[in-house]
Image: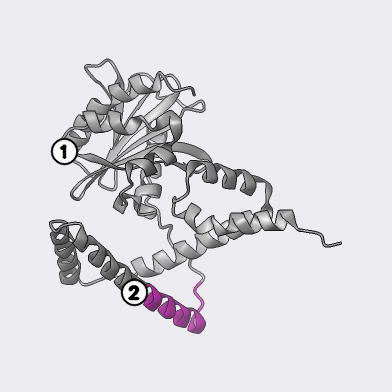
Amino acid sequence: MTLIGFEGAHCKKIQSYLDSYVNNELLVETNQELIKHLDNCEACARALEDRVRIKDQLKRAVLGETAPVALHERIRQNIRGTRRFSRRFDVLTRSWIFAAAAAVLFAAIALGIMVNSSNRSTTSAKPLSLEAEVTPGDQTGQILKVGFEDHVYCSIDHDMADRQFTKEEMSGRLGPQYEGLVAVVNEKIPRDYLVVVGHRCHYKSRDFVHLILRKGNEIVSLIITKKNGDAFPPGGAASIVQASGMRMYEAEWHDLQVAGSETRDYLVYVVSNESRTGNEEIASTLMPVISDFLKDVKA
């Protein structure tokens, strides 16, 4: 009699999802299935760690090569220029960008292999993610750091800020609890922003709802996560009281503005590359309507 290895087949299925999981491309249901499996399967958890480590090494290799200032500026101008063309040209533009990125990536890999073969360095590489520097004992800063690092992890490290989901994709990734957020935010967001990404993400053992709003080169993240015992301390110089009665806290790291507030069950963040005044305007507009929306969501 032939025995079928059901567990092995399930692991094979899970491992086929790992690259999409690392890139935050899975639907909510598949994402939850994978996380549950990883909690109980050491082999698949190791496979995920290997993929994350290799991806980070490749990105560090590419980012370690500094382009001349003139070339860097010319590329930025070309990218800004391509946004004025119609969508039919986007396909060609993206194909060219992906091809160029692949060429740089393979060159970096080859360079890294040659360097490592001739000279093994014992110096550890710097982390890819930006770090938020918080003074020990600064409870407000520690809580704001959560929103900042979620934004960096998803929007920057995993390039989600460059994506654009359809309404159907956002609905599927947000799930029935949070799919209504997109319409609420699009109705209230100031300054001609538009929600381009809506999904649920996972970072450092914390699940969060993530909406990305874009206007040209300006990027805004709206991040919602359960409090899990965390709460902003009352008062303090870092807080500003809005006309709506909500208390909002602010910080800045690496030229990114962070505003945070809370409801009974949730922490809510607005993170952007706007000016402080611009980020305040967006946050003070969105925080009250998000608070109202969350009253009808079962925590």
* Residue at 54%, 56% in the rendered image: 18
Is 265 placed above or below 175 here? Answer: above
Mark nearer the viewer, 2 or 1: 1
Image quadrant of residue 143?
A: top left
The one of 239 and 219 positioned closer to us in this rendering: 219
Checking the image for residue 127, the label placed there is: none
- On whether residue 111 falls in the magenta region, the answer is yes
What crowding class fits label 1: few (fewer than 14 Cα within 10 Å), some (14-19), or many (20 or more)? few
Q: Is residue 16 left or right of residue 243?
A: right
Name the residue tied to disc 2.
104
- Which amino acid does the dot numbered 1 rest on? Asp
Q: Is residue 73 above or below residue 137?
A: below
Whether residue 148 is visible, yes or no, is no
Q: What residue appears at the point 47 percent right and 45 percent down from the top-left corner?
A: 27
Which region is colored magenta? 104-121
Which colour assignment does the render follow? one colour
Q: How many marks?
A: 2
State the residue at coordinates (71%, 58%). 8
Residue bearing the label numbered 1 = 192
Q: Residue furthest right?
A: 1
Which sits in the foreground, 24 or 158?
Answer: 24
Marks 2/1: CA distance?
35 Å
Q: What kind of element bears circle 1?
A: loop
Q: Nearer the viewer, residue 125 or 197?
A: 197
